[in-house]
Image: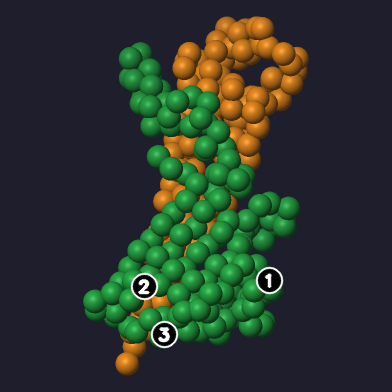
Chain colours: A orange, B green
């Protein structure tokens, strides 16, 4: 059980930067665009934006370091694309909270059903 | 997918009064929940406890007791699974955990509901993404299709 718990704690800690990265309106919009439109350059992502290119670059760096985006070089430009693996990991966090309650109920059962 | 609450239901082969004691008495609760509490559960109290889960003894947590309504309803708020000792969770909203008991054939039905995940950072992003882009699952499918097509 302690092995499962430590794996669980590790997963929660790993998921934390993903949740932090998602907790911002601008970053969510950037992420949604990259989901819908596929890989885009910083220049494309900055077109028509209400914030500066520098601000967008900063948000992209945050998303990249959380593992939600991958960056690659295309000629002179840096192109960002959505990387769904980390988002799935974040979703597994909620599944894990659910599994922790299952474990707790098993222990409660043993506690109250003992003769 | 719902991201705001988790609900669990189980039938325990024990009388309702026995299960009530196990969830409403801080020592009994701590025995199976694996926390060593410093005080009794009282409405409005914040009860600190040391985690006794093997490997996590250096961590502690706090329950803000919301309601104790014998013989069958108990609730508290807490920072769900706040496991990172480096992080300050105190400013984050808490989730509400509710225990409800009912007598059924064969024992006691226990319902545990934990809600409010959308308000905490862990849930907020997930919910916001779902609202913004019309479904997370659909979104992931879009991306998979997109990636597969090249």
User: Percent position (x, y) of residue A110?
Assistant: 36, 81
- Label 1 crowd (10 A; few <14 / some 14-19 / many >=20): few
Direction bottom: furthest residue: A115
The quarter of the image holding the C terminus of chain B is: top left
Query: Can you identify the residue that label 2 sits on?
Result: B102
| Chain ID of residue with mark 2 | B
Write down the residue under mark 3: B17
Q: Is residue B54 left or right of residue A115?
A: right
- Look at mark 1 in the image and give the residue it sits on: B44
Question: Which element carries disc 2, helix, strand or loop?
Answer: strand
Question: Disc 2 or 3, which lies upstream in sequence?
Answer: 3
Task: State the CA–CA distance, disc 1 to disc 3.
Answer: 23 Å
N-terminal of the pair, mark 1 or mark 3, is 3
Local crowd size for mark 2, using a 10 Å CA cut-off: few (<14), some (14–19), many (≥20): some
Seen from this angle, which residue lies furthest left?
B105
In 3D space, how far apart are the residues under numbered discs 2 and 3 (Cα atoms)? 10 Å
């Amino acid at each position: 059980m302690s092995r499962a718990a430590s794996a669980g704690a590790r997963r929660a800690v790993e998921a934390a930067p993903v949740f932090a990265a998602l907790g911002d309106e601008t970053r969510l919009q950037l992420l949604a665009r990259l989901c819908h439109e596929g890989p885009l350059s910083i220049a494309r992502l900055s077109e028509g934006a209400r914030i500066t290119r520098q601000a967008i670059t900063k948000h992209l760096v945050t998303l990249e370091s959380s593992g939600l985006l991958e960056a690659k070089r295309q000629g002179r430009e840096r192109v960002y694309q959505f990387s769904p693996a980390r988002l799935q990991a974040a979703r597994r966090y909620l599944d894990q909270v659910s599994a922790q309650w299952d474990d707790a109920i098993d222990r409660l059962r043993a506690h109250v059903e003992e003769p | 997918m719902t991201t705001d609450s988790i609900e669990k239901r189980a039938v325990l082969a024990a009388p309702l009064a026995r299960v009530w004691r196990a969830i409403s008495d801080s020592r009994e609760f701590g025995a199976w929940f694996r926390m060593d509490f410093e005080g009794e559960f009282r409405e409005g109290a914040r009860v600190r406890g040391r985690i006794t889960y093997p490997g996590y003894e250096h961590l502690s947590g706090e329950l803000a007791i919301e309601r104790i309504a014998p013989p069958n309803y108990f609730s508290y708020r807490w920072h769900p699974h706040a496991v990172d000792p480096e992080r300050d969770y105190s400013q984050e909203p808490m989730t509400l955990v509710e225990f409800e008991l009912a007598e059924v054939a064969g024992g006691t039905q226990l319902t545990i509901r934990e809600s409010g995940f959308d308000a905490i950072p862990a849930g907020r992003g997930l919910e916001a993404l779902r609202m913004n882009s019309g479904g997370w699952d659909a979104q992931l499918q879009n991306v998979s299709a997109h990636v597969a097509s090249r």
